[in-house]
Image (cartoon, rainbow, N blue to C red):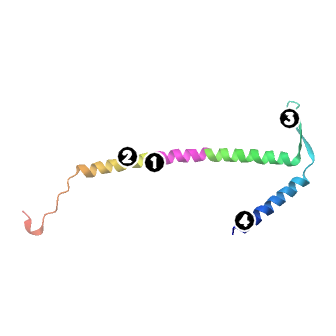
């Protein structure tokens, strides 16, 4: 199974490497204030991919943190409820049931 995974990884690497070699033309990126960069097309694509990954991860992290806070709040609530039930069971006395012949 590991060999198959490495073969797939190698195939993906070769496809991406071929893509990079085919797209080595220089492109111009112009900014609003008159700035201009000259980069190979593959770097522009890589930068756009990385920026998209950062945006996606930051969106995921915010929801993950919100869920963790909710889980922590629910755990605290559960602990308080368990303590309240424990105190109630300690404070109530257990009276054994009377036998059938000992009724008054």
User: Quadrant of the image for the C terminus?
Assistant: bottom left
Q: CA distance from mark 1 to mark 3?
A: 49 Å
Q: Which residue is mark 1?
A: 74
Q: State which tag comes first along the sequence, 2 or 4.
A: 4
Residue 100 image offset from top left, x and y in percent: 11, 69
95 vs 4, nearest the viewer? 4
Query: Which mark is drawn over residue 18?
Result: none
Q: Which residue is identified by label 3?
A: 31
Height in image: 1 above or below 38? below
Within the magenta stretch, is there residue 65? yes
Residue shown at 76% from the left, 46% from the top: 50
- Is 71 one of the magenta-colored residues? yes
Q: Are marks 1 and 3 in contact (CB under 8 Å)?
A: no
Which quadrant of the view contains residue 59?
Answer: top right
Residue 5 marker = 4
**SS category of the residue bearing label 3:** loop
Query: Which one is earlier in the sequence, the residue at label 1 or at label 3?
Result: 3
Q: Which residue was labeled with disc 2?
A: 80
The residues colored magenta run 62-75
Measured in 3D between alpha carbons, the distance from the residue under mark 3 to the one under mark 2, in whole angstroms, is 57 Å
* Residue 78, image x, y percentages: 41, 49
Residue at the outermost left position: 104
Q: Quadrant of residue 30?
A: top right
Q: Marks 2 and 1, how far apart in space?
A: 10 Å
**Badge 3 or badge 2: first in the primary sequence:** 3
* Marks 4/1: CA–CA distance: 41 Å
């Amino acid at each position: 199974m590991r060999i198959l995974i490495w073969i797939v990884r190698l195939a993906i690497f070769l496809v991406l490497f071929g893509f990079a070699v085919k797209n080595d033309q220089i492109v111009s990126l112009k900014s609003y204030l008159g700035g201009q960069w000259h980069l190979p097309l593959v770097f522009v694509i890589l930068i756009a991919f990385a920026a998209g990954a950062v945006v996606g991860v930051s969106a995921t992290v915010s929801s993950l943190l919100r869920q963790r806070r909710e889980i922590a709040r629910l755990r605290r609530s559960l602990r308080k409820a368990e303590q309240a039930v424990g105190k109630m069971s300690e404070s109530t006395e257990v009276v054994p049931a009377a036998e059938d012949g000992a009724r008054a």
